Every structure is written in C-alpha cells, then in structure tokens.
Amino acid sequence: MTFNDNARLDPSKVKRRRRTATGIGVGGGLGAIALVVISQLVGIDLTGLAPLLGGGSGTSQQDPGTSPEECRTGSDANANVECLVVGAATSLDDYWAGAAATVGADNYTTPGVYTFDGSTDTGCGAATAAVGPFYCPPDTSIYLDTAFYDDLRSKYGSSGGPLAELYVVAHEWGHHIQSLTGVLERSQDGDTGPTSNGVRVELQADCYAGAWASAAAGTKDVNGNPLLEQITDAQLTDALSAAAAVGDDRIQGTTANSESWTHGSSEKRQKWFTAGYNGGPTACDTFAPATP
C-alpha cells in the first residue's frame, strides 16, 4: 500500500528510542512473574525476556524518545521504513478515532508508538528485537524494532512489501483497541491451544488490521487529503503472506490443533484478516464461534 507523496504525516505519533543505561529496577523473581502475567494477558510469550530482568538494585534511564522529524510526507514514508511506521500511526489513528466506538471502545485514546534499535525499556520490562513487535498494556504503547521487517522476509518467509509492513503496526494497534474494550483483561486465563482465549485475542487483532486495511485509503491527513492510495491485489497478497508467516504452525512447526498454540494457524490468521477486510471491525468477534 503506497502513501500519497504529498500527504502530511504527524511525526509526533511515533518516538524513536535508544538504550541509555543497563540494569532494570525490578528484582529477578518479580520480573519473571510479571512477564508471565503480561504474556497471559496479551497472548504473546514475553517470558523469554526474563534473563534481562536480572536481580539487584540496578536502575535504568530510558531515553524518552524523539519524534522522527524527517518523516513529514507520504513520500518520506514510501522511501524510509521508520517513516512508514509514522505513516501507519497517522492513518491508524485517524481510522480508529472514528471506528473504535463501533466495537465498544467509546473512550478511544491514541497509543504510544516506539521504534528502537536492539533493546529498550517498556512498561512490560526490558525488550529486545528477539521479542518481535508487541503491545504493552501497562503503558498502552506499541514497541517495534524495524529490523523485524527483515526477519519477516528472511526468517519467517513473508513476501514483504509495504502493506505487509503496515499490517504489523495495524495488528498491534488492534491490541490497543482490545485493551480499551476490556477484551485483553477479560481473556486472561493462561490457556493455550487453537480455541484458547489467547489465540482468539490474536485473531481478533488480525481482523482489526484487515478492517483498517480495507478503509485505509479513506483515512486523511491534517489537511483532509487522502493518506494512502487504494490497495492493489498484489499488496493484499503480501499482507496475507505476512499473516500466514507468523502462524503458530509455521513458527512452532507443530500440527493442527496443537495445545501449544498462542496465536493461531496461518490459515486462521489469513481468514480473520480477510473477515475484517470484507466486513469491518464489527465482523471481528472471534470469541463467538466454538472454533474461531
């Protein structure tokens, strides 16, 4: 999906961070427990971060981040991946400001969006690029090391492309909508498997990403100009490829109905992205069917 060259982006919607100190002000035991709780809440396994939450009384001074002021136009977003994230945030914020109420998020607020290089501190603990993009409920923020886009192609086998990259941000924005509606809190039970609440949460975020993608060409910049051009069939294929690439059967190498699943199969992730694309956010009740 291509941005209109003259569209105005809002660089204040994204902050670029760099790690400025080492050590985390959380004891090892408490940090590990916190990660388990967060993992259950969002359906994302963050427990691999536990080694970063070492004991001791160290403190961390995190750069609050600076807005990428060079990212001001659609042309910038088409040329630079970090500016693409700014463009995604500009478009997603415009879309969900109007659409959030349709799924019960009457109190819509804009999430924080942080890009980082290598590692950063978050309300969910220390994060590294190995975790992948994620949404952190305690600080209502999305975190993304843009190097993940290279992994999406080289490690996970996605075909790549701009809409595939935008899908990643849109999926995490979907988790923010779930936080506002209370779905994240209500679905916290620690279960895994293809019909678990954790999988349903992830599939709903895929569906919300599809709903945005379908309407993205209608999102506007501050001057009322369209931010994005219409999606092409090839770009839609790229987005579906990205959804499939991060399916549990691809990542875990497990078979259908595996009880270790936390995100859903490639087929289901594509199915629910398409459901949102065709039906909008109100078509995204992944908790209603016996099998999502």
Image (cartoon, rainbow, N blue to C red):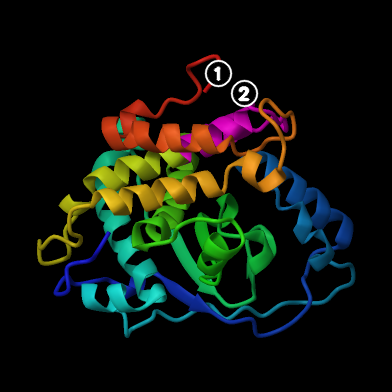
Sequence-first tag of 1 and 2: 2
Q: Is residue 187 magenta?
A: yes
- Horizontally, residue 260 falls left or right of residue 223, namely right
Q: Residue at x 76, y 46 (%)?
A: 36
Local secondary structure at mark 2: loop
Q: Residue at x 30, y 38 (%)?
A: 277
Give how far across and how far down residue 270 sits, in percent.
45, 37
Q: Which residue is mark 2?
A: 195
Q: Which residue is mark 1?
A: 291
Q: Is residue 191 magenta?
A: yes
Q: Nearer the viewer, residue 184 or 291?
A: 291
Q: Residue at x 86, y 67 (%)?
A: 54
Q: Amino acid type of disc 1? A: Thr
* Span shown in magenta: 183-205
Q: Nearer the viewer, residue 123 or 150?
A: 150
Give how far across and how far down residue 208 sits, in percent.
38, 40
- Horizontally, residue 222 falls left or right of residue 37, namely left
Q: Residue at x 58, y 82 (%)?
A: 18
Relative to 166, does residue 181 appear above or below in the rendering? above
Q: Amino acid type of disc 2? A: Thr
Q: Nearer the viewer, residue 44 or 189?
A: 44
Specify the quadrant that holds the N terminus: bottom left
Q: Are marks 1 and 2 in contact (CB under 8 Å)?
A: yes
Q: CA distance from mark 1 to mark 2?
A: 6 Å
Q: Quadrant of residue 262?
A: top right
Is the residue marked by circle 2 packed among few (<14), some (14-19), or many (20+) residues within 10 Å?
Answer: many
- In this rendering, does residue 73 appear at all? no
